[in-house]
Image (cartoon, grey):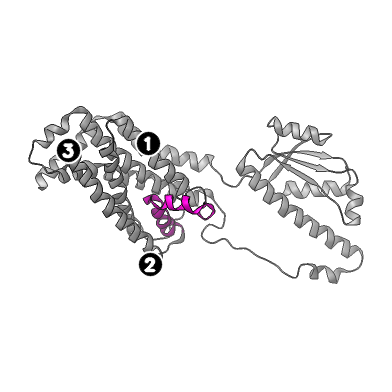
Amino acid sequence: MWQRLGAIIQKEFIQTLRDRRTLAIVLILPVVLLFLFGYAVEMQVDHIPTVVVDNSRDQRSWQFLEAMETSGFFDIEYYVQSEAEAIKAIDEGQARVAIVIPADFAAAVERGNAQALVVVDGSDAMTVQSAFNAAVTVGQAHAVDLLTEKLERSGLQGQSSSLAPLDVRTRVLYNPDIRSLVFMVPGMVALILQQQTVMLTALAIVRERELGTIEQVLVTPIRPWELMLGKILPNILIAFFNMGTILALGVFWFGVPFKGSLGLFFWMSLLYVFSSLGLGILVSTVSTNQRQAQQLSALILLPGMMLSGYIFPRSQMPALVRWAGDLLPVTHFLQIARGIMTKGVGFYFFRQQVWVLLIYGVVVFVLSAFSFKERLE
């Protein structure tokens, strides 16, 4: 058995190494994606280009604008004369935010009913979220400062401390600087492992069928499951090589912390790969050519990116969509990867996901093995 299996593995390695262009793409693409995410993707947007309509032009309006700019979220690029001109600047893409201050701003501050309008470009989801939250927070903090100053001028310094009877302080666990890469890298590892195992396995089997060489292999004493295992093992090695590259670059280049056990992460990755390989074989059994295999693989990969919680929180999704996401192994492995890498927790904290992956892997692998055998026959 081992001799037959070894022969198939050797044959797969020779085919993989012979196609150097595809091999280079497979090995380089994850690194390129990591650098794109590392340097180009930032979930929290700051230094947003801002245009100002200051109809008051007094000390109060300048103080308010200074507070907005000092926050680091708003970069005041230039001033215009009217709200219409400010919205035109947003339409033209010259600014993302407009701050409109009315003419009687200083007097309204003294009366205690001042208002300022912050117009945010809603066509950019990340910008609108960051700008909206920053505007509310900075506006409230500035309002408290103005009220405190007013009480002090009135000789009521002692009452200023009672204006805020509740002091809420926040502490962010595991990622205090809220760096996007800290939760991006575990997700990238999960998606890369799934992409490599599903797509490469499906393409390897379908390509063999297209070339007509699989019939030649089947006339040998090799059994179908040995052929299947021999074709997926090289892809496992490539997937783990890429996983190691991404982890090393994430930890040593981008400074992403790895707080948990590396050995535990390896064994959980192996379980996850086992589950994904079954999907790859299943895709190969229903595909008649490589193009169909690529499209079906993409059909699995894209929902994995959207529904697994990699980018969007699953708690905000409708129940039916969450259930669809539960059918993908990446959804469960993502929680394991983030638990080990970011939180440093052990097996006990994600044992439920482990059981799901184990049962999922056995069911899909057995189903795909039977489908593969029937297809060969």
Check disc 2 and report the residue beneath it.
348
| Residue 213 place in picture, x, y as percent | 16, 30
Check disc 1 and report the residue beneath it.
28
Say which of 339 and 223 sits in front: 223
How many numbered callouts? Answer: 3
Magenta part of the chain: 313-342
Reply yes or no: does residue 240 show up in magenta: no
Q: Mark 1 or mark 2: which comes first in sequence? A: 1
- SS for tag 1? helix
Q: Mark 3 or mark 1: which comes first in sequence? A: 1
Secondary structure predominantly adopted by residues drawn in magenta: helix
Can residue 150 be seen at all in this image of the molecule?
Answer: yes
Quadrant for the C terminus in the image: top left
**Which residue is drawn at the image coordinates 79% and 39% (left, top)?**
52
Q: Nearer the viewer, mark 3 or mark 2?
A: 3
**Which residue is drawn at the image coordinates 83% and 67% (left, top)?**
160
Q: Amino acid at mark 2?
A: Tyr
Label 2 packing within 10 angstroms: few (<14), some (14-19), many (20+): few
Left or right relative to 280: residue 319: right
Check disc 3 and report the residue beneath it.
376
Can residue 72 be seen at all in this image of the molecule?
Answer: no
Reply yes or no: does residue 316 show up in magenta: yes
Measure how far apart labels 3 and 1 are at the Cα level.
34 Å
